[in-house]
Image: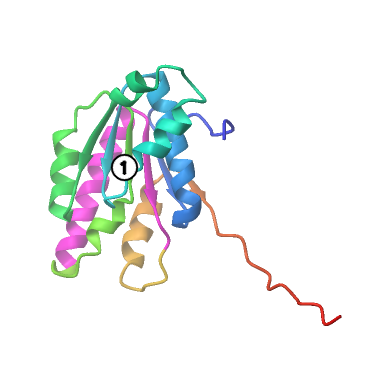
Amino acid sequence: MRFLPELPNGHLYLLLAPRPLQRPLLNEFIARLASQGELQVLVCGNRFDAHDIARRLRRYTEMVDAALGRIHLARAFTCYQVLSLLRHHRLAVLPTIVTDLPDMFYDESVCQKERLKLFQQSLEELQMLSRRVQTLISAIPSAHPARQPFLDLLQAQAETIWQLEAPVQVPLQLRLF
């Protein structure tokens, strides 16, 4: 997957894809950036596959342990923590990848109005961050109507969107004879 595009500063990128397609691409971006230097990964969906990233790093460098050590992880478990982490990293100088950003804002224990407000504030923080450093956000498309406003806001803020769809599985016609 060495065909991945570069991520210049001053641009907010969005990778919108179903999980089976998204994970390998996201891990490849992380591996490539870690082979070049330090980076910040904000994990929102509680999914981070260090083993796969280490395997992918071997394509870029022999010093896998050193490259893994350049990945600074932060995890958010609530929508409030996402905003707090983004504000904490407001002045970051490291390339930043935010995984599954909208996932933390789907929590129905927080009212929709509050979640939307927090999400918009998070997007503002990401816009400021993207002006200084490489910034990539990942999200998973959803058919659930309550989730669509978050995805719409995210797509409106991103300057570049890579939207991938799962290939359609054509049913196999069995032969009679």
| In this view, 118 is above or below 30 | below
Quarter the C terminus occupies: bottom right
Q: Is residue 8 visible?
A: no
Which percent across, then down, holds residue 38?
31, 22
Residue nearer the viewer, 36 or 111: 36
The mark total stands at: 1
Residue nearer the viewer, 50 or 24: 50
Residue at 13% from the left image edge and 43% from the top image edge:
84
Horizontal side of 166 relative to 57 (left or right) equals right
Q: Given the image, on which type of amino acid does mark 1 rest?
A: Val
Residue at 27% from the left image edge and 44% from the top image edge:
43
Horizontal side of 156 relative to 6 (left or right) equals left
Which percent across, then down, holds residue 11?
40, 35
Quadrant of residue 71 in the image? Answer: top left
Residue at 47% from the left image edge and 25% from the top image edge:
58
Q: Which secondary structure, mark 1? A: strand
Quadrant of residue 106 in the image? Answer: bottom left
Dominant secondary-structure state across the stretch colored magenta: helix
Residue at 20% from the left image edge and 65% from the top image edge:
107
| In this view, 97 is above or below 102 | above
| Residue bounds of the magenta highlight | 113-141
Q: Is residue 9 magenta?
A: no
Residue at image mark 1: 98
Which percent across, then down, holds residue 14?
42, 46
